[in-house]
Image (cartoon, helix red, strand yellow):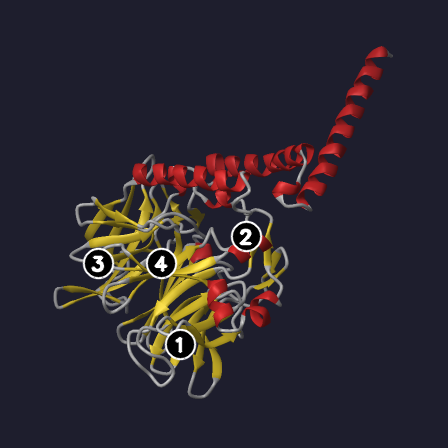
C-alpha cells in the first residue's frame, strides 16, 4: 500500500511539474524575452528540448543535414548523367556547393549534361565556422544585454554539415564569391581557394553583380531605431565594390519613409511573426541591379523582392526613391529576372503569410511575369514544381529556363517553348538516394573559351 502511495505521489508531482512548465511556457511565449521572469525563461527553454531532440535524432539517424530524400520512381537523373541524345546543351555548366563530410565542402563548376568538372574550389570551412561562432556570440550579447530585441542566434549555423556556400559566383579570373545563406559574411576566395576578403557586415540571400563588377546583396541593420523600438527585423540593401569596400548601405525602413510609403504599406499591414526570430515585415531576398536603360527603369536602379509583403519594387539609389512597386499577384516570391526592356519575372512560391504562419494553397509554385507596357501579369511553368521557400529561376541561352526547386532538391530544364526536357538532382556525397540541398547555384554557358553567367 505504501509503495502505491509513493508512486501516486511521484505521478502527482510529475503532473504538477508538467502543468507548471506548460503554464509558464504559455506565459513566456506571450512576452518578449526581456519581459519574461526567471520561471518563464526556464520554461520556454525546457519547451525547446523535444524539438532539439527531434532535430538531433533526424540528422543523426534518419537524414543528414542538407540532405533531401529522392523519390526513385520519378524520371530524375543525376547531374552529368544525361543521355547523348538529351536536348540539353553541351555548353551548359552549373556552379554549385556540395558538402563532402567532416569539415570539407567544395564548389564545383560541372557540365550539366556530361558531368565534366571544369573547376573546383575548397570552401574554408574552419574559417567560416570560427566566424559563425563569433557572430553567434556577438548577437547573443546584443540580445541578452537588451541592445538588440530579436534572438537571431538560431539563424546562425552551428555545425559543419549545415554550412553552405550560397549563390557561388565567379569573378576576376576564377575567384569566387559566396555567402552562408541565412546569416553570415560575404566571402571572396581566389582560384586557389585562398581568402581574398570578407564583408564587414552580415549578409543573407542573393548575390548580384552590376556592369562594373560591383556587388548588390541583402544585409541587416542592427542599429535601426524604429526596428529596435518596435522589435522587428530590419533588412537593408548592401552595395559593395568588387574589392569588398562598402559603397551604400540602405535600411528598408528609411527607404520606405523617405518615399512616404512606410505607414501605408509596411506599418499598416500584418507582419509575419516567427517565435524563433521575431517580427519580419520585409524578408528581403533579392537585390537585382538593372544593367541598361528602358522606358520603365534606368541603369543603376535595383529591383527588390520582399517575401513577407509579397512585393516587388524598383528603387533608384541615385535619387533615394522608390520608382515603382507592386504587391501580388505573386505570394511569398523570390528571385527576380529582367527579361527585356519592359518585362520582369519572379519565382512565385505561392505561399500566403498570416500572423505566425504561412499557408500553402493546393496549387504549385510557378514563374510569374509582369509586363510594364500592358500593366498586366501572367503565369507560366505552373504545373511541375512546388517550393514553399527559396526557389530560383535562370534564363538560359536560346530562351530556355532552369528552375531550382529548393524545397525538394530538384532542378528543371525547359526549352524555348516551355516544354520540360530534363529534371535532375545533385547526389549527396554519402548516399545517392539523397539529394544535396540546393544553395542557389548559378548557370554558366561555355562559349568561345569563356564562361558566361546566365
Q: Earlier in the sequence, mark 1 or mark 2?
A: 2
Q: Which of marks 4 and 2 is nearer the N terminus?
A: 2
Instruction: Using the rendered view, name the quadrant where residue 212 is placed.
Output: bottom left
Mark 4 → mark 2, Cα distance in angstroms: 44 Å
- Crowding around mark 2 (Cα neighbors within 10 Å: few <14, some 14 to 19, many 20+) is some
Q: Give the number of the mark in front: 1 or 4.
A: 1
Mark 1 → mark 4, Cα distance in angstroms: 26 Å
Q: Dot 2 corresponds to which residue?
A: 228
Q: Dot 3 corresponds to which residue?
A: 171
Mark 3 → mark 4, Cα distance in angstroms: 26 Å
Q: Could you tell me residue 220's position as x and y percent?
A: 44, 54
Disc sitting over residue 344 in the figure: 1
- Furthest-left residue in view? 449
Q: Earlier in the sequence, mark 3 or mark 4?
A: 3
- Furthest-top residue in view? 2
Q: Check disc 2 and report its element: helix, strand or loop.
A: helix
Q: Could you tell me residue 45's position as x and y percent?
A: 61, 35
Q: Could you tell me residue 41's position as x and y percent?
A: 64, 36
Disc sitting over residue 424 in the figure: 4
Q: Residue at x 72, y 42 (%)?
A: 27
Q: Check disc 3 and report its element: helix, strand or loop.
A: strand
Q: Are marks 1 and 4 in contact (CB under 8 Å)?
A: no
Q: Could you tell me residue 195's position as x and y percent?
A: 23, 45
Left or right of 84: which side holds 207?
right
Which residue is at the front of the view, 87 or 160?
160
Q: Give the number of the mark in front: 2 or 3.
A: 2
Instruction: Using the rendered view, name the quadrant where residue 247 is placed.
Output: bottom left
When the figure is inspected, residue 179 is found, relative to residue 25, above or below; the finding is: below
Q: Which residue is drawn at 49% across and 55% down?
A: 224
Q: Earlier in the sequence, mark 3 or mark 1?
A: 3
Amino acid at each position: 500500500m505504501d509503495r502505491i502511495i509513493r508512486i501516486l505521489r511521484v505521478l502527482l508531482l510529475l503532473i504538477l511539474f508538467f502543468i507548471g512548465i506548460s503554464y509558464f511556457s504559455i506565459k513566456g511565449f506571450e512576452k518578449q524575452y526581456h519581459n519574461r521572469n526567471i520561471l518563464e525563461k526556464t520554461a520556454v527553454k525546457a519547451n525547446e528540448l523535444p524539438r532539439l531532440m527531434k532535430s538531433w535524432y533526424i540528422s543523426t539517424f534518419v537524414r543528414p543535414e542538407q540532405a533531401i530524400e529522392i523519390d526513385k520512381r520519378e524520371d530524375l537523373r543525376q547531374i552529368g548523367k544525361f543521355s547523348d541524345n538529351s536536348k540539353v546543351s553541351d555548353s551548359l555548366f552549373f556552379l554549385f556547393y556540395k558538402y563532402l563530410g567532416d569539415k570539407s565542402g567544395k564548389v564545383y563548376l560541372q557540365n550539366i549534361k556530361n558531368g565534366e568538372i571544369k573547376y573546383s574550389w575548397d570552401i574554408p570551412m574552419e574559417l567560416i565556422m570560427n566566424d559563425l561562432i563569433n557572430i553567434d556570440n556577438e548577437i547573443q550579447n546584443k540580445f541578452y544585454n537588451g541592445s538588440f530585441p530579436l534572438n537571431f542566434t538560431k539563424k546562425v549555423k552551428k555545425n559543419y554539415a549545415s554550412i553552405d556556400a550560397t549563390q557561388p559566383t565567379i569573378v576576376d579570373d576564377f575567384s569566387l564569391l559566396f555567402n552562408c545563406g541565412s546569416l553570415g559574411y560575404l566571402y571572396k576566395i581566389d582560384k586557389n581557394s585562398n581568402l581574398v576578403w570578407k564583408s564587414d557586415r552580415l549578409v543573407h540571400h542573393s548575390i548580384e553583380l552590376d556592369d562594373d563588377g560591383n556587388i548588390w546583396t541583402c544585409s541587416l541593420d542592427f542599429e535601426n531605431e524604429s526596428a529596435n523600438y518596435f522589435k522587428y527585423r530590419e533588412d537593408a540593401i548592401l552595395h559593395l565594390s568588387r574589392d569588398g569596400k562598402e559603397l551604400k548601405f540602405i535600411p528598408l525602413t528609411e527607404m520606405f519613409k523617405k518615399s512616404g510609403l512606410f505607414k501605408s504599406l509596411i506599418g499598416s499591414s500584418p507582419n509575419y511573426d516567427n517565435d524563433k526570430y521575431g517580427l519580419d515585415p520585409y524578408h528581403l531576398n533579392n537585390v537585382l541591379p538593372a544593367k541598361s536603360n528602358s522606358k520603365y527603369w534606368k541603369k543603376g536602379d535595383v529591383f527588390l523582392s520582399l517575401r513577407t509583403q509579397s512585393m516587388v519594387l524598383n528603387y533608384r539609389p541615385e535619387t533615394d526613391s522608390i520608382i515603382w512597386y507592386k504587391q501580388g499577384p505573386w505570394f511569398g516570391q523570390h528571385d527576380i529576372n529582367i527579361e527585356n526592356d519592359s518585362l520582369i519575372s519572379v519565382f512565385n512560391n505561392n505561399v500566403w503569410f498570416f500572423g505566425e504562419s504561412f499557408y500553402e494553397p493546393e496549387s504549385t509554385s510557378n514563374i510569374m511575369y509582369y509586363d510594364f507596357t500592358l500593366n498586366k501579369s501572367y503565369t507560366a511553368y505552373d504545373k511541375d514544381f512546388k517550393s514553399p521557400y527559396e526557389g530560383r529561376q535562370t534564363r538560359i541561352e536560346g530562351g530556355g529556363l532552369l528552375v531550382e526547386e529548393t524545397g525538394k532538391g530538384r532542378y528543371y530544364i525547359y526549352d524555348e517553348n516551355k516544354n520540360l526536357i530534363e529534371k535532375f538532382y545533385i547526389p549527396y556525397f554519402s548516399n545517392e538516394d539523397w539529394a544535396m540541398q540546393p544553395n542557389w547555384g548559378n548557370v554558366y554557358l561555355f562559349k568561345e573559351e569563356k564562361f558566361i553567367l546566365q
